[in-house]
Image (spheres, rainbow, N blue to C red):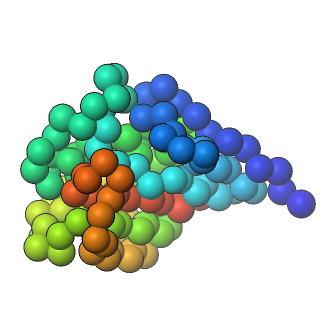
Amino acid sequence: MAELKKVSTEKAPAAIGPYSQAIVFGDMVFTSGQIPINPANGEIEAVTIEEQAEQVMKNLGEVLKAAGTSFEKAIKTTCFLADMGDFAAFNGVYAKYFTEKPARSCVAVKTLPKNVLVEVEVIATL
C-alpha cells in the first residue's frame, strides 16, 4: 500500500485547524482548500474577488511546489465562492493558472472561513 506523506511549506499559510496543507498518496497530491491568507503575515489583505483569487493561486502554487508538482499536473479542482456573481471574475484569474483545464466543480457556499470570497482545493499528479 502507498505511504501517506504530509506536505508543509512556510511559503503558504499554515493550517488553521487539524489538517495538513496537502497529502501525497502514491503519485497523487490532494491539497487542502486554500483561502487568500498572505503567508508572510497571516492576514487577509486582498479585498476584491480577483485579488483574493490571485492570493489563493499563489498559495496553491507553493503547496503544489512543496509536494513536487505544479498547476499543469492538476487533474481536478473544487472551487468555493461566497457569491456566484463572482464566477466570471474568478474564472479570469483561474484560467491564468490552470492552463491545462482540469476537471472542476465550482459552487457557491453560504460562508467560507474568515468570511473570504473564495477557496480552492486541487488534486494533482506528481
Residue nearer the viewer, 79 or 14: 14
Q: Is residue 44 left or right of residue 32?
A: left
Q: Is residue 53 left or right of residue 78?
A: left
Q: Position of residue 54 (x, y in %)?
A: 22, 46
Q: In which quadrant of the rendered view does residue 89 lie? A: bottom left
In percent of the image, x 47 and y 59: which residue is there? 122
116 above or below 9?
below
Residue nearer the viewer, 53 or 15: 15
Q: How many marks?
A: 0
Can I make out residue 46 in this image?
yes
14 above or below 30?
above
In percent of the image, x 53 and y 62: which residue is there? 123
Q: Position of residue 125 (x, y in %)?
A: 59, 58
Q: Position of residue 13 (x, y in %)?
A: 42, 35
In percent of the image, x 47 and y 48: which residue is there? 70
Can I make out residue 99 in this image?
no
Q: Position of residue 115 (x, y in %)?
A: 26, 53
Residue nearer the viewer, 18 or 87: 18
